[in-house]
Amino acid sequence: MSDGHPWRGNWVARMYERVRKRGYDSLTAFAEARPTASLVALAKELGKDDIAGVQVFQGLVAEAERSHKVARLVRGQFVRELNESLPDGWPPVLDDANRFKVAEAMGSWIAFTPETHKERARKARDALRATPPPTSWRPLGPDDELLLTLLPDEEV
């Protein structure tokens, strides 16, 4: 049991207990069932006052590293960040307001990207800047065709 603070007690056990209670065998499965939900939304679903988004992400990174699916995690986080900053998808024009929203999504995404994949993520970001995707493009999961071309899975 927790006293309402995310970092008190055994938060890892608390988080995984709640994931299992919802019928999932992993945090990844729980998160992938909600591919456009922000980390904060995932955390609130698991524990309104005693699970934090960063804790969810730490768990997702650990699972991705164990299963050699970090690129998939990075694509999934791109989906979450883009949906949060650009809920209507890629803007038709990069005016000042839209340029800020795109920068916000990309900056948050790169910040959440594990160090091992930052360079790949930066190249994907640069490719999107150089050749913007179609207007209203809004990937709904990590297996989006364009995302897969920008950030393919690792060779295991």
Image (tube, rainbow, N blue to C red):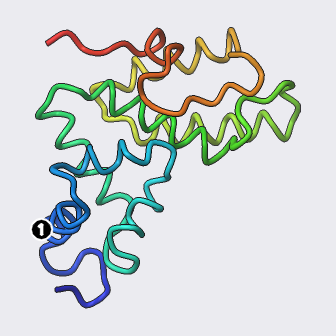
Q: Residue at x 26, y 63 (%)?
A: 22
Relative horizontal placement of residue 93, taking residue 104 as reference (left or right): right
Q: Residue furthest bottom?
A: 3
Foreground residue among 96 and 67? 67
Secondary structure beneath dot 1 equals helix
Q: Amino acid at mark 1?
A: Ala
The percent coordinates of residue 36 (x first, y second) are 51, 44
Relative horizontal placement of residue 136, taking residue 96 as reference (left or right): left
The percent coordinates of residue 154 (x first, y second) are 24, 14
Question: Is residue 97 shown above or below 13?
Answer: above
Foreground residue among 14 and 121? 14
Give the residue number, with chain letter if any, for mark 1. 13
Relative horizontal placement of residue 82, taking residue 16 as reference (left or right): right
Relative horizontal placement of residue 1, taking residue 33 as reference (left or right): left
Question: Is residue 13 shown above or below 144?
Answer: below
Question: Is residue 89 shown above or below 144?
Answer: below
Q: Residue at x 22, y 68 (%)?
A: 18
Which quadrant is home to the C terminus?
A: top left
Q: Residue furthest front?
A: 23
Which quadrant is home to the N terminus?
A: bottom left
Foreground residue among 103 and 14? 14
The percent coordinates of residue 17 (x first, y second) are 15, 67
Could you say which quadrant of the image residue 119 lies in?
A: top left
Could you say which quadrant of the image residue 114 lies in?
A: top left
Q: Residue at x 86, y 25 (%)?
A: 93
